[in-house]
């Protein structure tokens, strides 16, 4: 798949050159000498510019930036506190939005169609949903031995308000053949190697998930354009599943007659072993040994207070946070201040819409001065509870939904 920075021969496209000139505010001298497939440094976009100073950078090639849990305290995550997860390079922003096109193709569409941004905005009904995007590897740093992949703590999650059109409305417009089983996305981000024949990531979901009301092709988040690092000008947003299915810089959706076979659909990427494996055990990465991760498991966070806080013993401490459970709802949240010996039921709000996180609050008091840990544990509507310890080790380090804990000092 070609990216939109380079042309077929690998030279910078005229539009990319124009963007570069605009970015640096002057002429690009020796533009004709820029080697094929070279990405000018000016395109080395710094996503930290739009971020809270307390964000935690895990790496800059590719950019991966985590949100410390106490920064997730807002009901709706503001963009400056949204984690960033990239597999490739952040592409240059398109200079001419009228040229941005979304192509719907693949074996299982009746007609291949192309939509401009204004087609999408005007021809189809617009919807806004709060959607939880959580990286499948959120919590990975808890696994022992460590696995490959970013060692996320608990902050690779967000719940923002996305606006766009329903993918199902677009798919109805192109028409699906009876053999449609999966969709796969293609985005505009160059592969880390800058080799234009390589794709950084191209994942997808079964057609049933693609056709849910909340599956959006979005151009806005929290009422504004999507920031470049989060997929400007267009992205897929699919709540409740690993956020790797929410393709950024979206230009193509393929409707497939088989499980999508794009980049990061192979090996153990975003997959769990079907049988328990010993920590560190190597098992053959064949499809029979693994299942693709679908709905994310039940989880909760304490977003206030920040771990390490000093609390006034004479006052009631009003804890708060969020809880979510992939495709399910959360039915109960409990907190404990005595290492899980006793649990107290928290007050839990309904989600704003399906696949949004739910806010919880709990008033706790401490019996005497000293050091405490506060634990939180959510239970989903099928009775599934978060484990208190790290769950079963797996080769990709996915789905660690162990209880979140904070330390406080009561004085
Ligand atoms: N085109 C493209 N889409 C992508 C990715 C990417 O690298 N390229 N990363 C995916 C992964 S693994 C995650 S967790 C989410 C992160 O979304 P965010 O950076 O907007 O928080 O985007 C997903 N969509
Ligand atoms: Mo991810």
Image (cartoon, grey):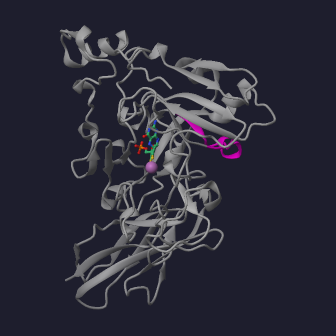
Q: Residue 29 placed where, x, y %?
A: 18, 9
Location of residue 151 with respect to 336 vertically, above or below: above
Q: Residue at x 34, y 22 (%)?
A: 37
Figure quadrant of residue 48: top left
Location of residue 163 with respect to 273 vertically, above or below: above
Q: Nearer the viewer, residue 281 or 214?
A: 281
Q: Is residue 176 left or right of residue 369?
A: right
Q: Nearer the viewer, residue 89 or 360?
A: 89
Q: Residue 328 placed where, x, y %?
A: 62, 60
Residue 304: say if magenta: no
Q: Residue 92 placed where, x, y %?
A: 34, 25
Quadrant where the image shows the C terminus: bottom left
Find the magenta span and give its range. 205-218
Q: How many marks?
A: 0
Residue 213: say if magenta: yes
Q: Is residue 65 left or right of residue 215?
A: left
Q: Residue at x 45, y 32 (%)?
A: 198
Location of residue 120 with respect to 325 vertically, above or below: above
Figure quadrant of residue 5: top left
Q: Nearer the viewer, residue 397 or 113?
A: 397
Q: Nearer the viewer, residue 81 or 103?
A: 103
Figure quadrant of residue 384: bottom right
Location of residue 282 with respect to 196 vertically, above or below: below
Q: Residue furthest right?
A: 178
Q: Residue 187 placed where, x, y %?
A: 48, 31
Q: Is residue 292 left or right of residue 201?
A: right
């Amino acid at each position: 798949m070609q990216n939109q920075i380079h042309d077929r021969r690998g030279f910078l496209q005229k539009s990319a050159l124009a963007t570069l000139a605009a970015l640096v505010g002057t002429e690009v001298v020796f533009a004709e000498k820029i080697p094929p497939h070279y990405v000018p440094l000016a395109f080395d976009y710094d996503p930290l510019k739009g971020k809270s100073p307390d964000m935690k950078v895990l790496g800059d090639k590719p950019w991966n930036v985590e949100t410390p849990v106490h920064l997730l305290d807002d009901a709706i995550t503001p963009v400056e506190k949204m984690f960033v997860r990239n597999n490739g390079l952040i592409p240059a922003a398109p200079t001419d939005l009228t040229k941005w096109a979304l192509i719907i193709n693949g074996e299982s569409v009746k007609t291949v169609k192309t939509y401009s941004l204004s087609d999408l905005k005007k021809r189809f009904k617009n919807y806004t949903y709060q959607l939880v995007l959580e990286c499948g590897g959120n919590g990975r740093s808890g696994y022992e031995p460590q696995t490959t992949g970013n060692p996320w703590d608990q902050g690779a999650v967000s719940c923002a308000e996305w606006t766009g059109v329903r993918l199902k409305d677009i798919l109805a417009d192109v028409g699906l053949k009876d053999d449609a089983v999966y969709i796969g996305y293609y985005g505009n981000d160059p592969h880390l190697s800058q080799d234009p024949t390589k794709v950084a990531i191209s994942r997808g979901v079964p057609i049933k998930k693609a056709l849910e009301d909340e599956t959006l092709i979005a151009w806005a988040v929290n009422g504004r354009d999507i920031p470049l690092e989060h997929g400007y000008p267009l992205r897929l947003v699919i709540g409740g599943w690993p956020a790797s299915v929410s393709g950024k810089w979206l230009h193509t959706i393929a409707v497939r007659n088989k499980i999508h076979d794009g980049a990061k659909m192979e090996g153990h990427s975003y997959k769990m072993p079907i049988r328990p494996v010993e920590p560190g055990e190597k098992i053959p990465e064949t499809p029979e040994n693994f299942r693709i991760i679908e709905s994310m498991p039940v989880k909760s966070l304490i977003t206030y207070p920040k771990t390490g806080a000093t609390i006034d013993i004479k006052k009631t401490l009003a804890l708060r946070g969020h809880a979510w459970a992939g495709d399910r709802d959360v039915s109960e949240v409990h907190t404990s201040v005595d290492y899980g010996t006793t649990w107290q039921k928290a007050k839990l709000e309904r989600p704003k819409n399906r696949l949004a996180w739910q806010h919880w609050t709990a008033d706790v008091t401490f019996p005497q001065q000293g050091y405490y840990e506060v634990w939180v544990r959510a239970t989903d509507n099928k009775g599934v509870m978060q484990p208190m310890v790290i769950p079963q080790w797996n080769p990709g380090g996915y789905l660690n939904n162990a209880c979140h804990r904070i330390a406080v000092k009561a004085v």
